[in-house]
């Protein structure tokens, strides 16, 4: 019985330590797709109020992203680099 309680305490201590480590991690800046999709979804939602929600907007954003040229994507790439450098 005493051994079992000691093992339970060790497990709970490890969980607390792991949780603290996860909370202390610094989030990384988003990639250029995230910046594009946020902007595109706002515009899409405003211009298509009849759309069925986020799923349709995200699908449209994905199709638009695939059809963009490298030069068009460079705008979002520069923005992502600026955020990364900060």
Image (cartoon, helix red, strand yellow):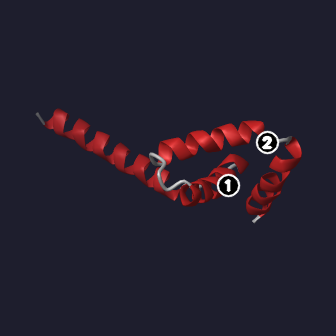
Q: CA distance from mark 1 to mark 2?
A: 14 Å
Q: Which residue is situated farthest in the bottom direction here?
A: 86
Please state, as top left, top right, bottom left or bottom right, where the N terminus lies in the image: top left
Query: What is the number of callouts on the image?
Result: 2
Q: Which residue is situated farthest in the right direction here?
A: 71
Q: State yes or no: discs 1 and 2 in contact (Cβ < 8 Å).
A: no
Decide if residue 33 is on the left or right side of residue 5: right
Query: Measuring 51% from the left and 58% from the top, which residue is drawn there?
Result: 24
Decide if residue 14 is on the left or right side of residue 69: left
N-terminal-most mark, 1 or 2: 1
Which residue is nearer to you in this view: 68 or 51? 51
Decide if residue 11 is on the left or right side of residue 64: left
Q: Residues within 10 Å of mark 1 (few under 14, many from 20)?
A: some
Which residue is nearer to you in this view: 6 or 45? 45
Kindly report which numbered mark, 1 or 2, lies closer to the viewer in this rendering. 2
Using the image, determine if residue 79 lies above or below residue 12: below
Q: Which residue is mark 2?
A: 68
- At mark 1, the secondary structure is helix
Q: Residue 3, image x and y in percent?
A: 18, 34
- Asked where in the image residue 39 lies, by quadrant, the reply is bottom right
Q: Residue 83, image x and y in percent?
A: 74, 62
Query: Measuring 35% from the left and 45% from the top, which residue is drawn there?
Result: 15
Q: Residues within 10 Å of mark 2 (few under 14, many from 20)?
A: few
Query: Which dot marks residue 35?
Result: 1
Q: Residue 25, image x and y in percent?
A: 55, 54
Please state, as top left, top right, bottom left or bottom right, where the C terminus lies in the image: bottom right
Query: Measuring 64% from the left and 54% from the top, which residue is drawn there?
Result: 40
- At mark 2, the secondary structure is loop
Which residue is nearer to you in this view: 56 or 21? 56
């Amino acid at each position: 019985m005493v051994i079992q309680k000691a093992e339970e305490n060790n497990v709970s201590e490890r969980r607390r330590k792991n949780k603290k480590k996860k909370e202390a991690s610094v989030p990384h800046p988003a990639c250029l797709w995230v910046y594009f999709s946020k902007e595109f979804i706002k515009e899409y939602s405003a211009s298509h109020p009849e759309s069925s929600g986020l799923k349709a907007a995200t699908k449209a954003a994905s199709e638009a992203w695939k059809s963009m040229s490298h030069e068009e994507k460079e705008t979002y790439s520069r923005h992502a680099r600026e955020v990364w450098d900060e």
